[in-house]
Amino acid sequence: MSAVPQYPVLRGDALDYYLGQGYYRMQQDLFTCQFLPVEGNLFTVHWLRLVLPLVQFGAEQRRLLRLNERFAVSIRSFQLTEEYETLYATYRASISFEAPSTVESFLLDGAKYSVFTTSVIEVREGAKLIAVGIFDSGLRTLAGIMNFYDPAYRRHSLGKYLMLLKIEYALRQQMHYYYPGYLVHGYSKFDYKLFACRDATEVFDSLNGYWLPFSWPEVARQSEELLANGYNDEEDADDLT
């Protein structure tokens, strides 16, 4: 199975632009959103990025890198393999949340080629593949797309480890931003995306179209505005019916 990028390929500067506007990859498209419904409740979505020149790993991050330094790490252009699908199936069977059925459905959804410039990080213990991290590259940006790992290595926090490896790679490439996706106000499942370096993290104000230094009060302010704006839009729509 192969997903080597061929044309048309999304240009790196175009990916940089759309990531900067709060868009993100979904399969072979770009999307954005402001709300996430969970079990009958509506939560607000807040897109994140790290300003790479400001990133400094603290004691917790350095400890995790030392814990996993015995593993072999390699980075290459992405090609979908049965080995990845087998590891993902093992990972998916161990999680309690809903996830796509395969790596192929997550990234390609039937497309023959990928329009994104995609790379993969492999983490191995000896010959055994234990973790995979997938990311897209622009000219000045890197977007973390997918991580999965062998649940037998849970104590090694391989999801967070892969995020650190992606950031280290982006720094070596002299990129400026790393995009980990979004977190959700009042729903802590996505808070791990702050692990790498909160002080270097920015949050996107989607109503006003600019990035601000991350803080929980800022997220709360944006959440309140998003919900108020959403309710106002519903009232406007009611007036038209």
Image (cartoon, rainbow, N blue to C red):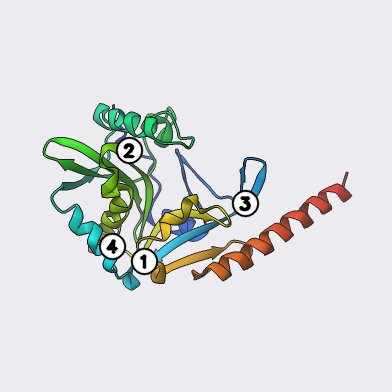
Front-most of residues 230 and 119: 230
Counting residues from the start of the chain, the first of labels 4 and 2 encountered is: 2
> Which corner quadrant holds the N terminus?
top left
- Disc 4 + disc 1, Cβ < 8 Å: yes
User: What is the CA distance from the residue labelled 4 to the residue labelled 1?
Assistant: 9 Å
- Real-space CA distance between mark 1 and mark 2, rounded to the nearest whole angstrom: 34 Å
In this figure, which residue is indicated by the disc labeled 2? 6
Give the labeled residue for mark 4: 61
**Residues under labels 1 and 3: Cα distance?**
24 Å
Q: Earlier in the sequence, mark 2 or mark 3?
A: 2
Name the mark on residue 33. Answer: none
Q: Earlier in the sequence, mark 4 or mark 1?
A: 4
Q: Can you see residue 116? A: yes
- The kind of residue on which mark 2 rests is Gln
Look at label 1 and name its amino acid.
Cys
- Tell me where residue 86 appears, x and y as whole percent: 29, 28
The amino acid type found where label 3 is placed reads Phe
In the depicted structure, whether residue 38 falls above or below residue 210:
above
Q: Are marks 1 and 2 in contact (CB under 8 Å)?
A: no
Q: Nearer the viewer, mark 4 or mark 1?
A: 4
> Of the numbered discs in the image, which one, if any, rests on residue 197?
1
The outermost residue toward the front is 155
Residue identified by numbered label 3: 43
User: Is 230 left or right of 19, judged from the image as shown?
Assistant: right
